[in-house]
Amino acid sequence: MTNAKEYAQALHGGVAVETLLKLVNKRGHERLLPRILLELKKLEQFTLGHASAKVVVASGTDLKKLKIEIANAMNKLGISEESVLTEVDESIVGGFVVKGKDALVDLSYKSMLVGLYKNIVN
């Protein structure tokens, strides 16, 4: 029997949303859609909890441009590329942030601008 957790695992594993919706409709499981979303959120939280690090960039192009600098920061923290989640957050303006379990390398434009502002104000 197919349940919400199995559908969520399929989505989490990379099955296209459109394909999954067709399958759900074909099997008459539309009533499971809210539960599928909840299960997907649980899977995402579980994955985030088991990743050893997270890289935050302002855009996908920043990830490409700063690949060497990000790799150097990860090496300093002893983080392997396989265990990293990547997130795009436009609020950091530019640069990158590498978050490990016990360390943080923040080379974002946002942190630099905030630091500059604090120096000017004080």
Image: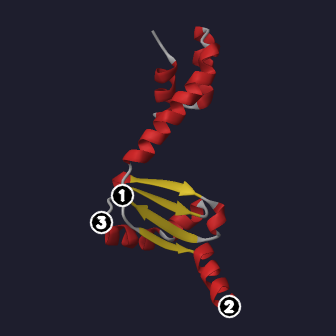
Mark in the foreground, 3 or 1: 3
Depth check, front residue: 28 or 3: 3
- Label 1 is placed on what type of residue? Glu
Q: Which mark is residue 78?
A: 3
Q: Quadrant of residue 76?
A: bottom left
Secondary structure beneath dot 3 equals loop
Q: Nearer the viewer, residue 8 or 21?
A: 8
Q: Quadrant of the C terminus?
A: bottom right
User: What residue sits 48% from the left and 41% below the top?
Assistant: 45
Task: Identify the residue position indicated by label 1 in the image.
Answer: 81
User: How far, Cα to Cα, is label 3 from label 2?
Assistant: 35 Å
Q: Secondary structure at mark 2?
A: helix
Farthest right residue in view? 121
Does label 3 or label 2 sit earlier along the sequence?
3
**Position above or below: 118 against 108:** below
The residue sitting at the left extreme is: 78
Indicate the amino acid at tag 2. Ile
Q: Are marks 3 and 2 in contact (CB under 8 Å)?
A: no
Tell me which numbered mark, 1 or 2, is placed earlier along the sequence.
1
Mark 3 Cα shell of 10 Å, populated few (<14), some (14-19), many (≥20): few
Q: Residues within 10 Å of mark 2 (few under 14, many from 20)?
A: few
Label 3 vs label 2, nearer the camera: 2
Residue 78 rendering spot, x and y as whole percentages: 30, 65
| Amino acid under disc 3 | Gly
How far, Cα to Cα, is label 1 from label 2? 38 Å
| Residue 120: mark | 2
Q: Is residue 122 visible?
A: yes
**Residue 55, percent across and down?**
47, 60
